[in-house]
Amino acid sequence: MDRALTVDEKLTRLTGILRDLGSVCVGYSGGVDSTFLASFAVEVLGAGNVLAVTGVSASYPAVQRETARDCARRFGIPHLEISTDELDDPSYAANPSNRCYFCKTELWTKLAAMAASRGLAAVLDGSNADDAGDYRPGMLAAREHGVRSPLMEAGLTKAEIREASRRRGLPTWDQPSAPCLASRLPYGLAVTVERLRQVEAAEDALRAHGFTQFRVRHHGDVARLEVAADEMPRAIDRAAAVRRELKALGFAAVVLDIEGYRQGALNEGLPLVQLRRTAVAG
């Protein structure tokens, strides 16, 4: 059996991938993976050969945007923000289970054009080795647009990226996962600007109460709160205040999910065959 590569060996492999590309345009959300990739690319290729691009729309949380801006400033990452218009696409707004495909199609179309106009050799995303077996229809859109995933190609897992980020002093190393706001809406519930703003305001309210690992799931008139197990006592203690604040945002009811915060909760109702098919296709 082949020996498993160490993190440093994987980083050496990543260095080689980036050097072979020469210049890159990085889809940059300000999350753990894309921040590490953008900063590492600057380290390997130099700032003149890297452009980190953030797609901004109502589905992109303002708190994440500030993180992306701050990290770009602190670590010398050339950074550009562009507007994306996925909400204008009826296929996206209808919120099917492959909603991310339509969102990423919008993003990668614009980034591919930008990379071509600036003479950058490749467009990169922050997918890591753990993403290969997950339900990620957006990866199909990336493949269709020739987007490379060097973290995945190097075999780097999420835990390894966090550790490498910590060693490099990136503040995102222990940041919770931060998918787009539309991921808080169950499939089939139309994605609207109003609902996205409700979710964002509700999560800002929970953040102000000191919660760190949580989601506010939008079920029409009902807000379902997922919080980490160690924060459940806080949720019970702050229940009255949180309920009052979220009702003021337009929710008729606020419920606490006793199963707590968990990644992939949005996909729990999908048939297993669909998850497997999409994992293979995307």
Image (spheres, grey):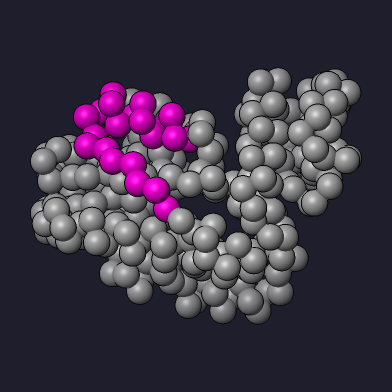
Q: Residue at x 11, y 57 (%)?
A: 119
Q: Is residue 185 left or right of residue 105?
A: right
Residue 27: x, y in percent? 34, 50
Residue 240: x, y in percent? 88, 23
Q: Residue at x 71, y 65 (%)?
A: 188
Q: Is residue 136 visible?
A: no
Residue 207: x, y in percent? 65, 26
Q: Is residue 252 left or right of residue 131?
A: right
Q: Which residues are magenta?
A: 64-84
Observer-nearest residue: 88 or 197? 88
Quarter of the image where the N terminus is located: bottom left
Residue 116 sits above or below residue 193 on the image: below
Q: Is residue 142 visible?
A: yes
Residue 189 sits above or below residue 57 on the image: below
Residue 77: say if magenta: yes
Observer-nearest residue: 192 or 138? 192
